Image (cartoon, rainbow, N blue to C red):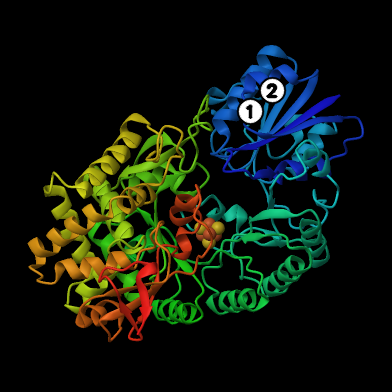
Amino acid sequence: MNVYLVQVVDAYGPNKFLPLAIGYQWCYADTTNYTLKDVLIEKIPPEEYVATMEDPYMVAMSSYIWNWEYNKKLAKLIKERFPKTIIITGGPQISKHDPNLFDRAPMFDAFIHGEGEEAFRSILAGEDWNTIPNVQTPTKMPRPAQRRKDISAIPSPILEGFYEPIMAKYPKDTLWQVTWESLRGCPYHCAFCDIGDSYWNKLTLFDMERVKAEIDWMGRNRIEYVSVCDSNWGLLERDIDITQYVIDTKKKYGYPMWWDATWAKNNVDRNFDIAMMNKAGGVNIFKGVTFAMQSFNDATLKASERFNINEIQVQEYLNRYKQEHIPTYSELIWPMPDETYFSLKRGIQKLIDLGQDSFLMIHPLVITDNATMGNKQYQEKYGIEVKTVPLDTYYLSADDLQNYIVEYTDAVYSTNTATWDDVLRGHMFSWVSILMYYYGWGHYLAKYMRKQGVKEIDFFESMLSWIEKSKNTLLHKEYKETQQHIYNTFHNKQFWGRKVRGDTDIYWEYKGASSIVLHDNKDILQNELTWFLQDVYELEDAYDIVKLNLAMTRDKDTQYPIVVENKSHIAHDMLDINSSVILIDHHDGTTVDEMWYNKAYHWDRKSRYWRCTASAGDKYYVVKGESNGSEITRS
Ligand code: SF4
């Protein structure tokens, strides 16, 4: 009897994903009487895939928000062509509370709630579905699923050889991304998160021998990217040993290249030790360390059952990371329950005050069925109104989106404490503050103004107001484009993101899109920021202040190092340098190619690619005043 397994994701760049969940199901079940015909990992057009299928007895799909619409379409077409095929699905997408799920997805024969291995094994063993505890059928809503207490009996798809036939179908030089976990569960209860449900509250662990054997396999098989599903990397002491093992494996084989983990929220000491091990190892496996705060508003933290580390610790560790030149980035979510436009801004200010100079992301709040926030009573209590919007389409290309089956999610449109106008304004404040501070275009202007007693959020608020009323400016055009895109996403289900480099471009996240436009129009930006500083703050030195800020942003076509001249009091207030001659350099000496914008404003944005270094350039003088690299001369 032929079985097909389906766990698909969007194509992001050249990497192909090796599926974990569906691998567990197959490896745990007794499959003696079945033939695994294929494992589908890419979103190829469903019609094409169905045409390749041979007498499918069963199709099992792993479902989450990024493949639910695709899975439904594929299942529908399979049912049309092969009406007797059994199609089952499980995964985080399957609501544990919806007895009417078959009305919305009638193409499936059964839904599996929670961890699926036991249920899938029972189904393949031919047991009566009505007796299998966490299986929902058209006639049976199961009782709440129970977690398994021990996961050690679940075989490893890696060690069972489940991935080899999948990899064999692709060219030898394919870049592989593996989804991996050393444990399941999370001790926290964040109301916006599926894993915050009490079902996931206990940790279950795979043993170290298995973990190490899997990492060895990743090294030997040249795995490019490891998406670690553990919810809190650094929560357990053994994460130190695992990290060391990954570093040693990369030293030995050159792989796995990247270890993308979600860092523990409350274990800052251990996180720091891990980051230092990575630094000492000399084979960088992390792209940075996260300080995911989500909100600084007490009422919001209470409403979302979120417990952050205290601010003194955040400050201490942000400083320690800075001293060690280890990039960190922070996350906030907007609009959370009980959050206001004002409290969002206060949170951004708090992060800046605590020393978050590297990177900040502010995610729109989306609601999933299995999270506490998916509960209707919760939504009523906090006045949460949602709109169905496309799932994040950032960084997909026009090619990827041809014949694309759009995935959807519910994004928060308004709450008791934030009207839609507030919500949109909050998104636009995020745009201006992150674009300026964390993509660099106004980073040192803000630092300069802070020395004059103007707080960063007040500075960005006045900039936002100035941009709104300065209708003939490039900044206004960028503002309007971004605002219109966000509006259209919420009201017309338009894709997230903007193309800025022609029809075949990727859909850039908005700050990245604006950064490309500003980079390519620096002279205009110089003038507009100067006008702004003159108009609003009546700064005499506005031109020079802007000039020095822009000189600190990495330019694609400049050969570094360069020497610039400016007024020494400006250099002091902006860069803490007591000199009117400043040597500006950048760490990336590689040749600029077609992908430079991707590197600067996508892949390496979290590690502050934009930022040049500056030092007193007293031993140099500038031949032509405004210099580039060729004009530097030693005095
Ligand atoms: S957001 Fe992170 S810490 Fe909070 S419940 Fe989810 S996985 Fe756990």
Figure quadrant of residue 329: bottom left
SS at badge 1: loop
Quadrant the C terminus occupies? bottom left
Left or right of 63? Residue 505 is: left
How packed mark 1 is, by other alpha carbons closer than 10 Å (few <14, some 14-19, many 20 or more), is some
Between marks 1 and 2, how big is the CA–CA gap? Answer: 7 Å
Q: Identify the residue at horizontal 69%, vertical 39% (top origin).
A: 134
Q: Name the residue under label 2.
A: 49
Q: In this view, does 97 lie above or below 77?
A: below
Q: In this view, does 154 lie above or below 26?
A: below
Left or right of 616? Residue 251 is: right
Query: Extreme right residue here?
Result: 32
Disc 2 residue type (three-letter): Tyr
**Nearest the eye: 590 or 234:** 590
Q: Identify the residue at horizontal 50%, vertical 41% (top origin).
A: 369
Cβ–Cβ below 8 Å for labels 1 and 2?
A: yes
**Nearest the eye: 625 or 294:** 625
**Nearest the eye: 181 or 635:** 635
**Nearest the eye: 242 or 80:** 242
Figure quadrant of residue 137: top right
Left or right of 355? Residue 580 is: left
Q: Identify the residue at horizontal 44%, vertical 80% (top origin).
A: 313
Residue 148 x/y as whole percent: 73, 53
Asked if residue 87 can be seen in this view, the reply is yes
Asked if residue 419 can be seen in this view, the reply is no
Disc 1 residue type (three-letter): Ile
Is the CB–ligand 1 distance for label 2 below 8 Å?
Answer: no
Residue 579 x/y as whole percent: 27, 85
The numbered dot on residue 44 is 1
